[in-house]
Every structure is written in structure tokens, then in C-alpha cells.
Image (spheres, helix red, strand yellow):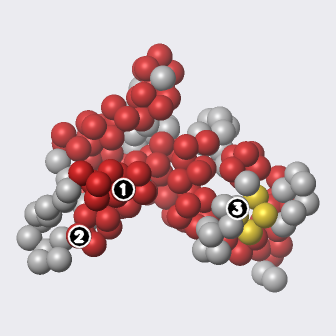
Amino acid sequence: MNPQNQQLMMYFRSVDTDGSGALEADELQRALTNGDWSPFSLDTVRMMIGMFDRDNSGTIGFDEFVSLWKYIEDWKQIFWRFDADRSGSIANNELYNALQAFGFKITRQIVDAVVNKIKILEGAKRFRDIGGISFDRFIYSCVLIKNLDDTFKQKDQDRDGMIQLNLETFIILSLKN
């Protein structure tokens, strides 16, 4: 095992409070912090478990944790690249620029809707105090848009940017994201 993975193994074991060899959301949350040392939100942690849980156990094993950690480090670099004012939070226009750079064909209205969703999840007062989206909510936003984009593309057979859905399909697809 390389030195970085050895260090990650020690960190993994320190948050694996029940010694099961797998992290549930509350344990993983203890391992993940924003730049200001505040913990990631459980919404973001659960979304990341859904993304990295390859064996569908509902937990993150060590190999999955290593993959997740690499993604977080990559996201951190991107976050700081687009946090133009170095405030430690991403404003709407900065999120728009980041998502555009990722190749998502989105509008400012979509970004506003994502930010409004985050404002509800965070609570308006806390959101106002932060002045934008924290690092974990940046990850949440990117993963949310990616999941929605992937889901849409699965249904857009002719790649014309249009799909037809009945109510049941719409609800099922929405609940998956």
C-alpha cells in the first residue's frame, strides 16, 4: 500500500467508529470538512455515498473511500479555481461558470434554481451568512446537475434535447436524483 493510502487507511479507521470496515453517512460526515472546518451536510454525504457505493451496500468501504477522497481533492481544486473572489464560497455566477466549464449546457435560471434548493436545505439565514455555496454544496450542485444530465440523456434517444415523459416516469426519474 502506498504512503498516501496508508494515511487514508488510518483516517478511515479513525472515523469507522463501529469497526465494521464500512462507513455509514454519519461516519463519513466526520471525515469530510469544508475549508472552514464545518462538516459536510448529510445531504451531500448521502449523495456521495450513492455515487461511490459500487457494491450497493449503502456504505463506503475503504477502496470506495479512496476513490471518493480523490474526487474530493479534484473538486477542491476546481472550487478554488472558480471562487474568483477567494471568499470560500461560490456565488451564482461562479457556479454558472464552473458548470459551463464542465460542459453542462445550462442556463442561469437553472443555476438560480439549484442555489434556491441549496438555500432551502441550508436554511435562508445560514445561507445568507455564508454568502454563497460552501465547498460541500458545490459538490452537491455538481453531482446533482451531472445526475440530472445523465438521466435526461438516457431518455433523449435522438439527442435533440427534447424528451416526452408521462407523470409516473417523471416522478420516478425525479426521485432517483
Q: Which quarter of the figure has residue 83?
A: top left
Q: Residue visible at 23% across and 70% down?
A: 155
Q: Secondary structure at mark 3?
A: loop
Q: To which residue does mark 2 refer?
A: 155
The Cα–Cα distance between marks 2 and 1, rounded to whole angstroms, is 13 Å
Q: Secondary structure at mark 1?
A: helix
**Camera-side residue: 91 or 112?**
112
Of callouts 3 and 1, the N-terminal one: 3
The Cα–Cα distance between marks 3 and 2, rounded to whole angstroms, is 29 Å
Circle 1 Cα neighbour tier, 10 Å, few/some/many (<14 / 14–19 / ≥20): few
Circles 3 and 1: CB distance less than 8 Å? no
Q: Residue visible at 67% across and 71% down?
A: 64
Q: Position of residue 23 (x, y in %)?
A: 76, 58
Q: Amino acid at mark 3?
A: Thr
Q: To which residue does mark 1 refer?
A: 172
64 to 36, vertically: above or below: below
Q: Amino acid at mark 1?
A: Ile
Of callouts 3 and 2, the N-terminal one: 3
Instruction: Say which quadrant the C terminus sits in.
Output: bottom left
Of callouts 2 and 1, the N-terminal one: 2
The label on residue 59 is 3
Circles 2 and 1: CB distance less than 8 Å? no
The Cα–Cα distance between marks 3 and 1, rounded to whole angstroms, is 23 Å
Q: Residue visible at 19% across and 59% down?
A: 165
Circle 3 Cα neighbour tier, 10 Å, few/some/many (<14 / 14–19 / ≥20): many
